[in-house]
Image (spheres, grey):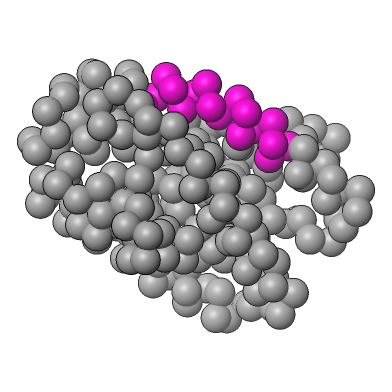
Amino acid sequence: MHIPDGFLDPLTALVTYAVSIIYAAYAFYRVRRSKKSEEIVLASVLAAGIFAAQMLNWPLPGGTSLHFVGGALAGILLGPWLGFISVFLVLLVQCLVFHDGGITALGANVFNMAILDVLAGYVFYRLFPEKYKLLGAFLGGWLGITIAGIACGVELGFSGQFPYSLQSTVFVMGTWHALLGLIEGAITSAVVSYIVKKAPHLLMG
């Protein structure tokens, strides 16, 4: 899902950069006002785990790839702002140090994985009542990565520099990430279940 350089046209790259920068500025503002040392430590540990999970890549037809994201879990444990920052720092290091995702496409990658996926996990977990929280965690993990994959497909399809149609990119990215999302949803739900038993104070709400 990490879009490399040369796959997005300038307009798509600029729009996604603008949205991501505005969201990042507000997220850093919110975290500075309400940060707690325990949350910062948890964010660091979670970022390390997400970094490791995202390094596992499976190639897909058309020059892109499939991998776990972990954004929904970050949203559940850290909320939409600190969760965003945790995933954003992972993507930034991957881009600048490991060349996983292009610099020109960083705005799109941040939008897909650090905004959409994190928000999906946070929203679905919060929406469900207490006795159905694990279902909310599963749906957040599943829909988060699926929505992020579809958004990636839309960005690639709209870009004039990518050699495949919008229908093809959305279908390929949406279908494969919906399948992987079942595994990510199960892992997200399992981690949340473990934390509920061992350290429930770490969960949002």
Whether residue 122 is visible: no
Q: Quadrant of the N terminus?
A: top left
The residue lying at 55 percent from left, 81 percent from top is 32
Magenta-drawn stretch contains 180: yes
The x and y percentages for residue 114 are 45, 53
Would you say 130 lies left or right of 45 here?
Answer: right
Q: Quadrant of the C terminus?
A: bottom right
Whether residue 112 is visible: yes
The x and y percentages for residue 14 are 17, 56
Q: In the image as oriented, which residue stretches furthest toward the right?
A: 197
The residue lying at 68 percent from left, 40 percent from top is 188
Instruction: Name the image quarter holding residue 185.
Output: top right
The x and y percentages for residue 104 are 20, 57
The residue lying at 49 percent from left, 24 percent from top is 178
Would you say 65 lies left or right of 82 here?
Answer: left
* Residue 149 sits above or below residue 116 on the image: above
The x and y percentages for residue 28 are 47, 74
Magenta-drawn stretch contains 156: no
Would you say 159 lies left or right of 198 here?
Answer: left
Question: What kind of secondary structure does the magenta stretch mostly adopt?
Answer: helix
The residue lying at 37 percent from left, 66 percent from top is 97
The part of the chain drawn in magenta is 173-189
Q: How many marks?
A: 0
* Residue 69 sits above or below residue 158 on the image: below
